[in-house]
Image (cartoon, grey):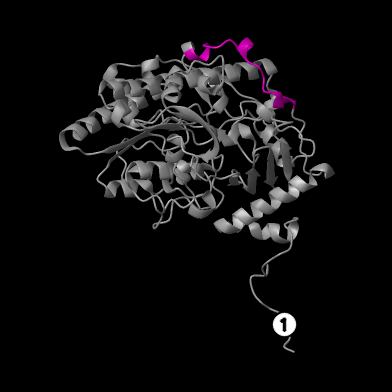
Amino acid sequence: MTDQHRVDTLGCYGNPHVATPNLDRLAATGTRFDRFYTPTAICTPARASLLTGQAPFRHRLLANYERNVGYLEDLRDDAFTFSAALAERDYRLGLIGKWHGGVARNAASYGFEGPDLPGWHNPVDHPDYLAYLDERGLPPYRISEPIRGTTPNGNPGNLLAARLHQPVAATFEHYLATRAIEHLDRYADRYRTEGKPFFLATHFFGPHLPYLLPDAYFDRYDPDLVELPPSVAETFEGKPPVQRNYSDHWTFDTIPIEVTRKLIAVYWGYVTLVDEQIGRILDRLDELGLTDETSVLFTADHGEFTGAHRLHDKGPAMYEDIYRIPGIVRVPGEAPGVRHEFATLTDCTATILELAGCDPTPAVDSASLLPLVRGEHPEWRAELVAEFHGHHFPYPQRMIRDERYKLVVNPESVNELYDLFDDPHELHNRYPHPELAPVRRRLMRRLYDLLRERGDNFYHWMTPMYDIGASDHDPSLSVFELEESQ
């Protein structure tokens, strides 16, 4: 699993410039999901959805703790987790890398072995990482040439990238892959000698910004290769004002466009660095002779703007750049292929449970991907629903997209409707256009029905405010008026 990973940076998803041979190899031998989405484009809620198989509104871990504005900071005590189900079947559990799933509880609280690595980005002061460097005589973390913009109040903006003065072997990414391989060796030994099955996750902190890379990756790609995303032409006309505010927060307009190209080129270098570390883990699986007995999943928690819509990072805008993510599943004995159904990060939960022989039904918002991996054609969702609850401040959103259109409901602002066939970069909000009134009405009603079926109380705002057709229930939640008896 990677963090903040654009799907269009992978060769297997069509990028002609970025070297990702290891993930491309995984895709070529597994099933690549072309329309794979996060349930919410923010780290902690998305990761909690993977752990529980539940949508964020249900597990209620709605924000990253660093910017938490009053939401829960840990899952409830009674929350279902796939790790608990696997532990009941005597699985050995490992998680190497980013946890970011709560404050009071860490990965070990849910049964995972591995160093406790908290936070949103590489914890380069962590004792285990420092010991790793010391044992190998590797130099410590040091950066130069920071790239920042200027915030609206004139202060330096968030760090976006910098040159890292370490060899590859000293990078946090190499350290994570090394620790994962060490765990894999131990788990393989127990599997051979005792038949004890294992689940091992490696969660890289990258390619999340800031992009901190050694020279070979910082300068790997020529910025002249970079085609700027067409949505840098974003004007924010007819869109929620919060998007322009976020653009100012991320200082896009204070950075020269040639620096934006360089940032994207450096991001590509980060993707290649992570791909190489994933390759080390996959190679070790081959060397151990376990490839034909081990299922492998690859995905990310959400995407990244990298200048699209004049934004960086992620935030209160439900564009494809941050909601569509990579999704690859390789199951021994299953033929490779590509699937175009709407699938989600949350679906990985039921998939893991079914692979381990566990009951997937407690993962109530998750559907196992195994029928699709097997080439079957089961009844499947025709639309995708996603949600957002805020970052820096509360900001509720719900989104539905079908084959062609995407509707985003913003209760405090203007709603959005995009025609993804005619406007794939989502530059033109068609919500007020009269010729699309039937589409708007259809999607609004369908979203309303799906939220009610789920139990997502967001639908209560929609009941009186939007065209959802005739109401079939008392929106006051109580019966105050009884029909007078005759």
In the figure, residue 25 lies in which quadrant?
Answer: top left
Residue at disc 1, secondary structure: loop
- Residue 304: image location, x then y, percent: 58, 30
The magenta span reads 217-233
Is 393 left or right of 78, judged from the image as shown? Answer: right
Q: Position of residue 448 (x, y in %)?
A: 65, 55
Residue 175 sits in quarter: top left
Tell me where residue 122 appears, x and y as whole percent: 44, 29
Q: Is residue 174 visible?
A: yes
* Residue type of the residue flagged with mark 1: Glu
Residue placed farthest to the bottom in the image? 486
- 480 in relation to 400, above or below: below
Q: In the picture, which quadrant includes the C terminus? A: bottom right
Q: x%, y% of residue 108?
A: 32, 43
Is 212 situated above or below 93? above
Location of the N terminus by quadrant is: top left
Describe residue 127's horizontal placement relative to residue 239 as left or right: left
Q: Which residue is mark 1?
A: 483
